[in-house]
């Protein structure tokens, strides 16, 4: 998808502005929670080198989240309030990030499925008509290439390893895929409006991009991503995700609650 002309938030209708704000907040919240989930494994990764990689990826995600939150200024929203003053049930992050990754196989599934979906959404966003996305998102995507390479390498390693490693990876991918697909390719009016405005690709095209990107890796554990049905039960149109929310402890960390008195913007 290419855009001959670009638009800013002020150029859009009220409905389109609201839909775009949902999309940006959802991407930013997902980046913020993704960073939390990676940070959980700084010391628990299988090797020192992998722990260092997790640290680097966590920093990338938080930096990307801040850039995305900053876009909300164009909608009359104070990014500091969004980052530091919302309850858990206001977060629009991918459902799969609501709870910590229980083991390293789940981390790998998170990199491939969840981080992969976020990057696919960003690719579509960067190619659309919204000017800030076209100028700021490409650098994020360049930094995400390392995440994808690490996830692919570990996915192949676990898929070809012991039966238990392969089964754990498959179980985690199976668990994360349905709600992640619903988040990535919403079947609601907001997604249709953003597509009609040229801000994002149509949901079927975004899903097809995801299938082409991660499908070969998921095939290694016997998953045909094209046959996986998106789980839209309890869909919350205001947030663009399911009805749940991240755990309170992780949201407290994301908000910086323990260091609130030391907060410097």
Image (tube, rainbow, N blue to C red):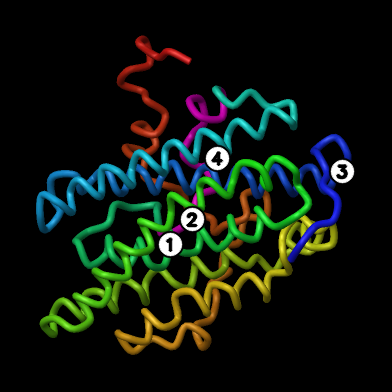
Q: Secondary structure at mark 4?
A: helix
Question: Residue 38 vs residue 132: left or right?
Answer: left
- Residue located beneath label 3 in the image: 12
Name the residue: 40% across, 54% down.
Answer: 97
Cα distance between the residues tagged 2 and 3:
26 Å
Q: Residues within 10 Å of mark 1 (few under 14, many from 20)?
A: many
Name the residue: 20% across, 48% down.
Answer: 41
- The quarter of the rendered structure image containing the N terminus is bottom right
N-term mark: 3 or 1? 3
N-term mark: 2 or 1? 2
Q: Which residues are magenta?
A: 81-96
Work out whether 248 lies above or below 116: above
Foreground mark, 4 or 3?
Answer: 3
Cα distance between the residues tagged 4 and 3:
24 Å
Q: Residues within 10 Å of mark 3 (few under 14, many from 20)?
A: some
Q: Is residue 227 magenta?
A: no
Q: Residues within 10 Å of mark 4 (few under 14, many from 20)?
A: some
For residue 114, which numbered disc appears in the image?
Answer: 1
Question: Residue 138 vs residue 261: left or right?
Answer: right
Q: Position of residue 191 (x, y in %)?
A: 73, 61
- Residue located beneath label 4 in the image: 90
Q: Position of residue 12 (x, y in %)?
A: 87, 43
Cα distance between the residues tagged 3 and 1:
30 Å
- Residue located beneath label 2 in the image: 94
Cα distance between the residues tagged 2 and 1:
8 Å
Q: Position of residue 137 (x, y in %)?
A: 59, 47
């Amino acid at each position: 998808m290419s855009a001959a002309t670009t638009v800013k938030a002020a150029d859009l209708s009220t409905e389109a502005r609201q839909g775009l704000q949902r999309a940006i907040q959802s991407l930013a919240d997902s980046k913020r929670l993704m960073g939390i989930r990676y940070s959980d494994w700084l010391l628990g990764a299988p090797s020192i080198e992998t722990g260092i990689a997790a640290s680097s990826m966590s920093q990338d995600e938080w930096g990307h989240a801040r850039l995305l939150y900053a876009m909300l200024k164009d909608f009359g929203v104070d990014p500091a309030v969004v980052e530091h003053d919302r309850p858990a049930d206001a977060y629009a992050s991918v459902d799969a990030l609501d709870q910590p990754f229980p083991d390293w196989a789940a981390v790998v599934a998170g990199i491939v499925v969840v981080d992969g979906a976020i990057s696919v959404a960003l690719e579509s966003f960067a190619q659309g008509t919204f000017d800030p996305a076209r100028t700021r998102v490409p650098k994020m995507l360049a930094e995400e290439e390392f995440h994808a390479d690490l996830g692919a390498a570990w996915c192949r390693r676990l898929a070809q390893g012991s039966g238990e490693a392969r089964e754990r990876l498959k179980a985690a991918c199976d668990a994360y895929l349905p709600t992640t697909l619903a988040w990535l390719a919403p079947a609601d009016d907001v997604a249709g409006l953003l597509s009609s405005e040229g801000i994002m690709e149509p949901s079927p095209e975004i899903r097809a991009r995801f299938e082409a990107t991660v499908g070969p890796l998921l095939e290694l554990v016997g998953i045909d991503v094209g046959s996986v049905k998106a789980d839209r039960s309890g869909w919350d149109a205001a947030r663009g995700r399911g009805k749940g929310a991240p755990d309170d402890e992780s949201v407290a960390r994301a908000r910086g609650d323990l260091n609130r008195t030391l907060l410097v913007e």
